[in-house]
Image: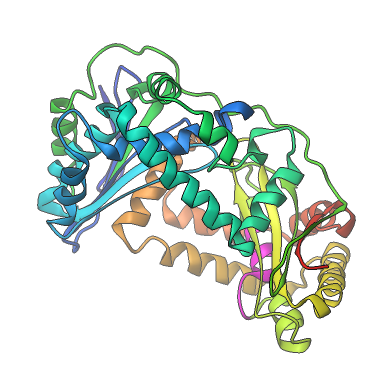
Amino acid sequence: METTRLADGLFRTHVPNGLTVLSEVLPGVRSAAAGVWVKTASAHEPRAKMGVSHLLEHMVFKGTERRSARQLALELEGRGGSLDAYTSRDHTNYQAHVLDADLPTALDVLTDLVRRPLLRAQDLELERNVVLEEIATVEDTPDDLVFEVFAERLWPAHPYGYSILGTRETVGALGTGDLQAVHAQGYHPANCVIAAAGQVDHAAILATLEREGWFAGEAGAPPQAPVVPAPAVRGGLHAMERDSAQVHLVFGTDIFPYRDRRRFAMSIITNAFGGGMSSRLFQRIREELGLAYAVYAYQQFFQSAGVLGVYVGTQPATAALAEEAIRQEFAKLAAEALPAEELVAGKRQLKGQVMLSLESPVSRMNRLATLALHGEPYRPLDAILAEIDAVTADEVAAITQEFFDPARQTVVRLGPE
């Protein structure tokens, strides 16, 4: 094995079988966060199997070779810790946050979930119904459903536009064989990243993982390759009639992926545009016009693409006014970019967000995993802050001109006519 010291208290190990292990010591805390990231998720599903990765994430909690579903629930919670999981576009994650003394147990439980699930047919119908209830919850929550519809309209023929949860039809058709196939193809060491942070010891983590069988075997199947990017459908208004008290609007377009160095500039712009109470959208739509309670801008960076978006919820009588005001703000930003003082303030805001986000073991763990998942070299915090400071007005102007043009925005309107 090759272990590299990336910084004081921060280590990375490459195992011959393809597994990557990272850890960071945080003096002064009494807890540890640990997680396993599987590089297989919704973006790697064919349309007919939509939701299989998410259903598998649910099913591993129904029992493993060594623990029942109840034992999995009690093992860490009974010690004051937590155990959680989620499925994203590009990866599936299982993580725990525990007292430092319980880290070996947490790694044992995580290994059980990822490597030793039973995936029994008798559990499938119960968990399928749970996922169908989750889908029903989204369908009954317009400010969630509008994002599902938006993704589908933006990428109608690409997995980034598929629902992570799947549909009633696709989830209803999945069998244990589908789950076992995804598990066999993706849940192996070469396709996984393990990260831990807090009061941890890298050598002890490696010893625990070796006991759990993570280092066995040679490199087998290669890690999951990122999906091939596909052109998005830009522009146009898609209206979906729905009986609700509000009209929910999402404006958005495709942008660059995570590894693009422009992501810092985009984050500065998005913050200024709709990132908080001081942002342009909040001040115009809520404070000046009183058209909405919730209005914000966001960006998401995937392995092969990204999304820039704006959400607003407003009454049917004011929906047209809110839509027009937001289009005006898009047009103004595209034409004028950010003035010097707003760029300076945006850099200060983003640097503060970055530093504050690294104050917990869970956030430090996630940062480590992100490096490995996207193949990025480690950079100390000062280097990241310097990169934010280096963003220029010309870079910002180029991004606003390309991505904030109102004509480029795909718009989804969900609510009463």
Asked whether 241 falls inside the magenta stretch, the response is no
What residue is shown at x 45% (from left), y 23% (from top)? 178
Q: Percent from the top left, x then y, of residue 306?
A: 66, 45
In the rendered image of this protein, does residue 281 appear above or below residue 226?
below
Q: Percent from the top left, x then y, of residue 317?
A: 82, 79
Q: For this rendering, which residue is in front, 161 or 30?
A: 161
What residue is shown at x 78% (from left), y 35% (from top)? 231
What residue is shown at x 77% (from left), y 69% (from top)? 338
Q: How many numbered circles are shown?
A: 0
| Left or right of residue 375: residue 76 | left
Q: For this rendering, which residue is in front, 331 or 136?
A: 136
Q: Percent from the top left, x then y, of residue 147?
A: 65, 55
Q: Quadrant of residue 265?
A: bottom right
Asked whether 271 falls inside the magenta stretch, the response is yes
Note whether residue 393 is visible: yes
> Which of the image's four quarters has the N terminus?
top left
Q: For this rendering, which residue is in front, 402 or 217?
A: 217
The prevailing secondary structure element of the residues shown in magenta is: helix
What residue is shown at x 57% (from left), y 33% (from top)? 170
> Which of the image's four quarters has the C terminus?
bottom right
Q: Percent from the top left, x then y, of residue 165?
A: 53, 43
Q: Indicate the colouring scheme.
A: rainbow
Note whether residue 199 is visible: no
| Left or right of residue 185: residue 344 | right
Residue range of the region highlighted in magenta in the rendering? 265-277
| Left or right of residue 354: residue 348 | right
In the rendered image of this protein, does residue 341 appear above or below residue 36?
below
